[in-house]
Image (cartoon, rainbow, N blue to C red):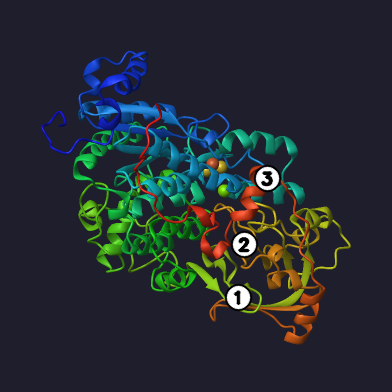
């Protein structure tokens, strides 16, 4: 029996409701925190999984967000228990935070399952922390609700808005071409990151926060409130109240994260001009739920969706502006009105997407445009390419690319690592012009390892000085969501496993045709076969430790770069006791 007379005992009661020695152990040690015996009366026990860490600056304030969630859980009659998870901070972790996304997902999954929880609130912020938490929670399938930590306030430098990430590349170019001094760059660092929160461009963190909301896993409006806005804490409190109800309703991720929910998220991503990283993370998440989602779905679903949001890196504004213009609900309302979303899809509110956003208003027309006059026309979202250079696919973010390069033929200049390119990119003698195609390889999931965000390498200094602003780059790695340029990403299979990218040589003609969705190496098959016979895989960089485990089990980019053994849902049952 539970405290409300419900016949079915809650999951947590298998611990706290137990009699004898076992129950004593479960309760007694909890009481050392000052909990009275009444909290074990069968009320819902809500885990608050927080990825707060001073090593993940975008998540550092989540401890405060957790306090607000707790208030809400108490208000609704639940017992909140906060616990820390790993935090994959994008800016500090080497060789790349992506190497640890699956590790974090695995940790989140195991912590939720192993503990006496009935439901969980997931607190994330920086890029990988959001998909990692969603993946872990999906594989347990207890009621779960996400609260992202919110973006930083707009950066301000010399009276102008500057965007995290996006302006790092701009400042680097200005430094190289002598338009900025080193002192000015130091000063700009502080101007760009002036409050708690994650990147305030439409980078991967903002994208994944919006994806969590579009998927129906966080409360409407949750993605966009700035990290320091009081309403961020209000919504966290509301989330605390709501998760208690969700436990009673048995509203689990598997009911929310359906094929339709993923289709909604993919379309929302096109409408917000979101990060290419969403392709990888959504694919991996779908794999946890057994939802069949392939790269071609992404391409097909975005073709009729215009970009409605004018945010960096594709546009001008930043997340704070997006929030004040109506936030994601205003974008989703526009898509629902245009028949571009499955409006009936259920969300964490217990209501449908269409019900959640009914009455959401667009304030002004500059930041969030309408379907009648979109910021960029339909079909400008992330394109999926195929061809003999990427048999299992590659992606290109059209809204961040130069239109003139979307159909292009040029000679390859090949680098076996990003470092090899960086060594020569300042060389005034480098044999390169604006038609050259820079090929950077061995930056894939196994090759680096971890598939880092190194694909949008800066242009050769020689070309920057000549006023060239973009050139075609091709890589098996990823690009930061805050990055821009004509960059073909996620080439699969990657070079390190013998993908055709490994066979390209300097001078080979490469043909990109984005409207035709193809990427080809114009070298005949016989020659490619001859080169393949000569190819040998690179020596493994790791023979032990987690990085070794990663290279043994990571899947290719088109499968979401999850571990094969983590696919699927393993549920919340734990048959055996600990003592
Ligand atoms: Fe954490 Fe951009 S570095 S969100
Ligand atoms: Mg990033």
Q: Nearer the viewer, residue 232 or 307?
A: 232
Foreground: disc 3 or disc 2: 3
- Please state if 254 lies on the left or on the right of 399 as rendered: left
| Number of numbered callouts drawn | 3
On the image, numbered disc 2 is attached to which residue?
485
Mark 3: secondary structure: loop
In this rendering, does residue 161 appear at all?
Answer: no
Q: Nearer the viewer, residue 205 or 25?
A: 25
Instruction: Give the numbered dot on residue 391.
Output: 1
Tell which of 411 and 171 is nearer to you.
Answer: 411
Q: CA distance from mark 2 to mark 1?
A: 23 Å
Check disc 2: other Cα within 10 Å, few if <14, some if 14-19, many if 20+: many
Q: Residue at x 33, y 32 (%)?
A: 116
Look at the numbered disc 1 and give the secondary structure of its residue.
Answer: loop
Residue carrying label 3: 95
Q: Are marks 3 and 2 in contact (CB under 8 Å)?
A: no
Q: Please name which of the two marks, 2 or 1, marks the residue nearer to the observer.
A: 1
Quadrant of the frame with the C terminus: top left
Of labels 3 and 2, earlier in sequence is 3
Q: Which mark is residue 433?
A: none
Specify the farthest residue to the left.
5
């Amino acid at each position: 029996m539970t405290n409300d007379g419900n016949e079915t005992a809650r999951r947590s009661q298998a611990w706290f409701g137990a009699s004898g020695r076992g129950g004593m152990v479960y309760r007694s040690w909890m009481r050392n925190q000052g909990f009275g015996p009444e909290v074990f009366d069968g009320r819902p026990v809500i885990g608050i999984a927080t990825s707060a860490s001073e090593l993940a600056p975008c998540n550092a304030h989540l401890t405060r967000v957790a306090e607000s969630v707790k208030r809400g859980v108490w208000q609704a009659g639940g017992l909140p228990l906060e616990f820390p998870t790993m935090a994959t901070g994008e800016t500090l972790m080497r060789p790349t935070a992506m190497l640890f996304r699956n590790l974090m997902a695995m940790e989140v999954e195991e912590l939720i399952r192993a503990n006496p929880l009935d439901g969980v609130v997931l607190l994330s912020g920086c890029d990988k922390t959001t998909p990692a938490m969603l993946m872990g929670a999906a594989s347990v399938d207890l009621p779960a609700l996400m609260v992202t930590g919110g973006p930083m306030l707009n950066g301000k430098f010399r009276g102008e808005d500057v965007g995290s990430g996006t302006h790092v590349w701009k400042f680097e170019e200005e430094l190289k071409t002598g338009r900025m001094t080193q002192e000015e760059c130091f000063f700009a660092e502080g101007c760009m990151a002036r409050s708690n929160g994650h990147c305030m461009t439409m980078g991967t963190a903002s994208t994944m926060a919006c994806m969590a909301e579009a998927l129906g896993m966080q409360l409407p409006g949750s993605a966009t409130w700035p990290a320091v806005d009081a309403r961020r804490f209000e919504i966290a409190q509301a989330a605390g109240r709501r998760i208690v109800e969700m436990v009673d309703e048995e509203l689990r991720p598997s009911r929310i994260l359906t094929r339709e929910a993923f289709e909604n998220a993919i379309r929302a991503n096109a409408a917000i001009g979101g990060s290419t990283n969403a392709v990888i993370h959504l694919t991996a998440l779908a794999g946890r739920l057994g939802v069949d989602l392939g790269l071609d779905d992404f391409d097909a679903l975005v073709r009729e969706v215009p970009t409605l949001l004018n945010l960096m890196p594709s546009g001008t504004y930043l997340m704070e502006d997006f929030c004040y213009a109506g936030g994601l609900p205003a974008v989703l309302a526009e898509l629902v009105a245009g028949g571009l979303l499955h409006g009936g899809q259920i969300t964490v509110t217990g209501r449908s997407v269409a019900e959640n956003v009914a009455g959401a208003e667009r304030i002004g027309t500059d930041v969030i445009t309408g379907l009648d006059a979109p910021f960029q026309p339909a079909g400008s979202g992330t394109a999926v390419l195929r061809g003999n250079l990427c048999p299992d696919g590659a992606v290109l973010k059209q809204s961040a690319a130069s239109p003139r390069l979307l159909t292009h033929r040029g000679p390859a200049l090949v680098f076996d690592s990003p470092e090899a390119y960086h060594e020569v990119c300042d060389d005034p003698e480098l044999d390169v012009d604006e038609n050259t195609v820079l090929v950077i390889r061995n930056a894939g999931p196994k090759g680096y390892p971890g598939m880092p965000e190194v694909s949008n390498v800066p242009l050769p200094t020689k070309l920057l000085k000549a006023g060239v602003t973009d050139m075609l780059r091709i890589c098996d790695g990823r690009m930061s969501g805050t990055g821009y340029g004509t960059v073909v990403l996620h080439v699969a299979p990657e070079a390190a496993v013998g993908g055709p990218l490994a066979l390209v040589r300097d001078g080979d003609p490469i043909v990109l045709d984005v409207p035709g969705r193809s990427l080809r190496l114009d070298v005949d098959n016989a020659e490619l076969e001859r080169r393949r016979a000569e190819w040998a895989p690179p020596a493994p960089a790791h023979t032990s430790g987690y990085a070794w485990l990663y290279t043994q089990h990571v899947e290719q980019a088109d499968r979401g770069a999850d571990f094969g053994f983590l696919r699927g849902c393993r549920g919340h049952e734990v048959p055996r006791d600990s003592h």
